[in-house]
Image: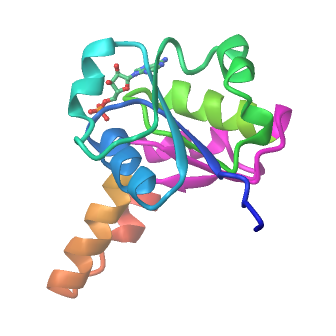
Amino acid sequence: MLFQKPKNIIIAGSGRLGSSLAGSLSEKGYHVIIIDKDEDAFRKLPESFSGYEVAGDAASTDLLERLDIKNAFMVIAVTDNDNTNSLIAQIASRIYGVNQVFARLNDIEKESLIKGFNIEVIYPFLLAVHEFERLTSISIREVFRA
Ligand code: AMP
């Protein structure tokens, strides 16, 4: 019988988004490691979460190395700090060659921090703008890009 190697996913930040993603991805069979600097944040994880909780600074290369980031299938940076998220995403993509790297950024002006890297950026602000446009058929995006 052939065993497939588990696909490791590292999630930085166990806030509302990070903990929900961790729960769903671990239910889907991924091997999830979630890092938060505040141990209390792990309380947000759903009962179904079957991965590992690691207390610490997710931007620490020492910690990421100990968690075997170089073999991670995916890294998701969703702390509440844009600079931290871009740093983690850059470390994952640039230093450790992780192929699938996602970073949440709240400030669309921070895009320049990760431009040119192999990183997918999720902007909650732009998602809300797109949804507003979809619901109203009024295009406002260019105003923010000006
Ligand atoms: P939220 O704002 O609900 O998405 O939560 C963001 C989470 O990121 C919080 O639980 C913070 O404790 C966590 N966080 C912020 N900075 C770091 C960091 N450097 N390392 C690990 N977790 C962090």
Could you tell me if residue 8 is visible in this image?
A: yes
Residue drawn 55% across the image and 21% down it: 58
Q: Is residue 59 left or right of residue 98?
A: left
Q: Is residue 138 left or right of residue 53?
A: left
Image spot of residue 29 (x, y percent): 50, 57
Q: Nearer the viewer, residue 52 or 143?
A: 52
Q: Nearer the viewer, residue 87 or 14?
A: 14
* Quarter location, residue 87: top right
Q: Is residue 145 above or below residue 15?
A: below
Residue lying furthest front: 1
Which image quarter has ligand 1?
Answer: top left
Image spot of residue 33 (x, y percent): 52, 34
Range drawn in magenta: 94-122
Image spot of residue 73 (x, y percent): 69, 51
Q: Is residue 146 above or below residue 82?
A: below
Q: Is residue 71 left or right of residue 130?
A: right
Q: Is residue 72 left or right of residue 145?
A: right
Residue lying furthest left: 136
Residue drawn 74% across the image and 29% down it: 68
Could you tell me if residue 146 is visible in this image?
A: no
Image spot of residue 63 (x, y percent): 65, 15
Residue drawn 60% across the image and 19% down it: 59
